[in-house]
Amino acid sequence: MKKVVISLRHAHEKNPQDYSAAIIYWYGILDRMGYEVKYYDYNNYNIDDLYQTIKDFKADYFIHINYLIGVHKEFDKLRELCKVFLLSSDAYRFHDSNLKYWIPHVDGIITFEGVKEWYIRDGLAEDSFFKMKWGFNPNTMCTTDVPKVYNVQHYGGLHGDRRPKIERFKELGVDVHQEGFLTHEQMKESLAKSKYSLCFSSNAIGTRSELKGRVIEIPSQTVLLTEEAPELDTYFDESEMILFSSVEDAVDKINHYNNNPVEYDKLLLNGKKALWNKNTVYHEWNKILPLMDPDYKQIDPIKILKEQHGEYYNKL
């Protein structure tokens, strides 16, 4: 059995009592896909300690999730021991300021297709780019069953043009329940209490459209109500989410589904099925691992889901 050390932040940087995003999306997966896994908490990063951890574990691969500013050159030392990969979910935001500097110091970069040309432009070999998508992690995102309390919900910051858009919803008669920073469990409960959750695609400063991680959080609990975003159509079609082109379009669609509860229930179920049947992290790693590990034997993600999460999967 091959061995992997995965470096990730265990606690959320704003709330040490909460999971980090890396835990929410990536924890507990490769252990079920034929690898022996050791997790390293990079809140306590020290290159010598990390080196010794990898050496003692006799790791074949090291995967660093996200990044640490200014330490990329130190990873050359780790490549004496095993293959080293960087997995980044913030490539759209931090490529030019940080992530491109990792290119000479890792064996491959795992990130979104939309930024591939940036990495190739900056010197990454074509066969060292590994395309990933956001993946639903059933170990951390299973459905919470609570009554619906809110009509439309939005959580997180109101950056860029989000605040005026939410005000426009209210002008058109649709109140948006706004949540700020939530722990992971609070986020799941708030989503589950809502009939719809908004996903805006503009980045924090409003300069480009991005695919948000919440596209695979929201449908686990409720209906995804989203603007168009890069690669969104590789996750869901319009029988599995509500795609809107303007606030007015969104309000029309909300009113339609609120007036047609059978159609709403079908849309809600379709979104959950889409997550479990084609958008889990098992599906994503099943595509990435053969490119990283020539000895990897592909698994059946649905079989794992039924074995590990039959209580939820069989309700779909």
Image (tube, grey):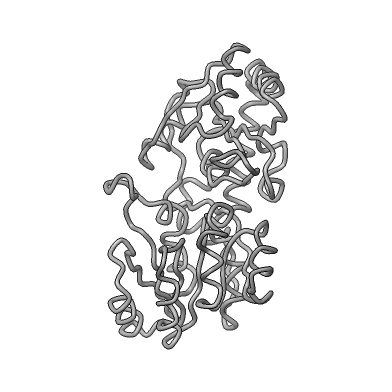
Say if 144 sits above or below 67 in the image.
above
In the picture as drawn, the residue positioned furthest to the front comes out as 97
User: Looking at the rendering, in which quadrant would you find the N terminus?
Assistant: bottom left
Say if 270 sits above or below 99 in the image.
above
Q: How many marks?
A: 0
Residue at 54 percent of width and 31 percent of height? 197
Is any part of residue 316 visible from this angle?
no
Q: Is residue 67 left or right of residue 111?
A: left
Say if 70 sits above or below 107 in the image.
above
187 or 85, which is in the foreground?
85
Q: In the rendering, at what x and y percent does residue 199 appear?
A: 58, 35
Q: Is residue 226 left or right of residue 181?
A: right
Residue at 40 percent of width and 74 percent of height? 5
User: Looking at the rendering, in which quadrant would you find the C terminus?
Assistant: top right
Is any part of residue 137 visible from this angle?
yes
Q: Is residue 252 left or right of residue 275?
A: right
Q: Quadrant of residue 225?
A: top right
Q: In the rendering, at what x and y percent does residue 124 appear?
A: 63, 74
Residue at 63 percent of width and 70 percent of height? 129
Residue at 63 percent of width and 53 percent of height? 278
Q: Quadrant of residue 164?
A: top right
Q: Quadrant of residue 14?
A: top left
Q: In the rendering, at what x and y percent does residue 12 appear?
A: 34, 50
48 or 53, which is in the foreground?
48
In the picture as drawn, the residue positioned furthest to the bottom comes out as 80
Q: In the rendering, at what x and y percent does residue 208 appear?
A: 65, 44
Say if 264 sits above or below 129 in the image.
above
